[in-house]
Amino acid sequence: MGNDGGSIPRRVELVREKQRPKQADKDAEAAARWKHCQLSQQPLRQPVVACDLGRLYNKDAILQQLLAKKSRSPLADHIKSLKDVYELKLTVSADSAEGEHGGSYDKCLWVCPVTGLEMNGRHPFSFLRSCGCVLSDRALKALKSDTCPGCNSPNKYTGDEVIPLNPPAEEVERLREAMNVRRAERKASREGKKRPLEGNSQEATTSKTARTSSSVKHPSARDADVQRIAQRSVATDPAASQVFKSLFTSSEDAKKRDHAHWVTYNPFYN
């Protein structure tokens, strides 16, 4: 402890300080979000889909989630069908080799098609809901054209058309509110289209009933038609010739004849 020819101890060696908690490796957390499916925790492989909250999934994991009735993950409870996810169009980096898991784990597999930035969590990325192309936010700010550089489709790079990937918690709440608004608008639009169709079907049914009722005659009218047909015969028809009338047994010539007519067969004479 001094004066003994030894070393003098420092304070850190005499006083035991409280150990600070180890901070999680931010790079490892980013790799988990950007390289792994949020549901299955498996490495992302094509086809990759994203939801309205900007989370990344393997499409087969979403299919298993939808087919499962009891063991559904609460992380994807907002996904009710495949219409609630968007299949992403990802640009593969030139130096990433296709391997067993769709590419090298150490190297980033996907990049921005405009700036070439790696999609590894260090740079913010977003996707377009209309076409599913994935671009870096730096590219979205620099774009001045109205067409997507990935697929050349017309797009708007503002508002709800752009969904950020793996956003922070405060951004997730905003995306959830926007998602609920869009779904409510779609539901109201479907109901609005359904009501005119129901009205047209009712009008068609009413018109068909009216035509059917008009075509069906009253029993008294049918009886009158039967009586008129029964009273009318060839023998009393003024338009029929005498030769034509003689072919029938109701004519006067047929009553006087004692043999069958050569044209018609009359069983009364055989």
Image (spheres, rainbow, N blue to C red):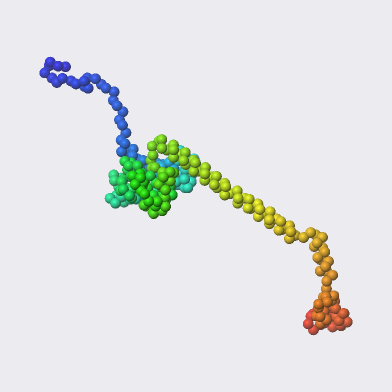
Residue 22 lies, with reference to residue 237, above or below; the image says above
The residue shown at (21%, 20%) is: 11
Direction from residue 36 to residue 9 in the image, left or right: left
Residue 31 is at least partly visible in this image = no
Taking 209 as reference, is 53 above or below it? above
Location of the C terminus (image quadrant): bottom right
- Horizontal side of 80 relative to 222 (left or right) equals left
Q: Nearer the viewer, residue 194 or 231?
A: 194
**Residue in view at x 36 percent, y 52 percent:** 149
Asked whether residue 207 is in view, the answer is yes
Q: Is residue 99 left or right of residue 204?
A: left
Q: How many marks?
A: 0
**Percent x, y of residue 138:** 33, 44
Q: Position of residue 204 (x, y in %)?
A: 65, 55
Residue 148 or residue 146, whichever sits in front: 146
Q: Residue furthest left?
A: 5
User: How far from the left and from the top, in percent, is residue 185?
Assistant: 52, 44
Where is residue 1 shown, x and y percent of the image? Answer: 16, 17
* Snapshot quadrant of residue 123: top left
Query: Which is nearer the eye, 97 or 64?
Result: 97
Taking the view exactly as shown, the residue that stands out farthest to the right is 256
- In the figure, is residue 269 to the left or right of 15? right
Pick whichever, 165 or 62, lies toward us. 165
Question: Which residue is found at the position 43% from the left and 49% from the top?
Answer: 130
Q: Residue furthest front?
A: 144
| Point 15% across, 20% down: residue | 8
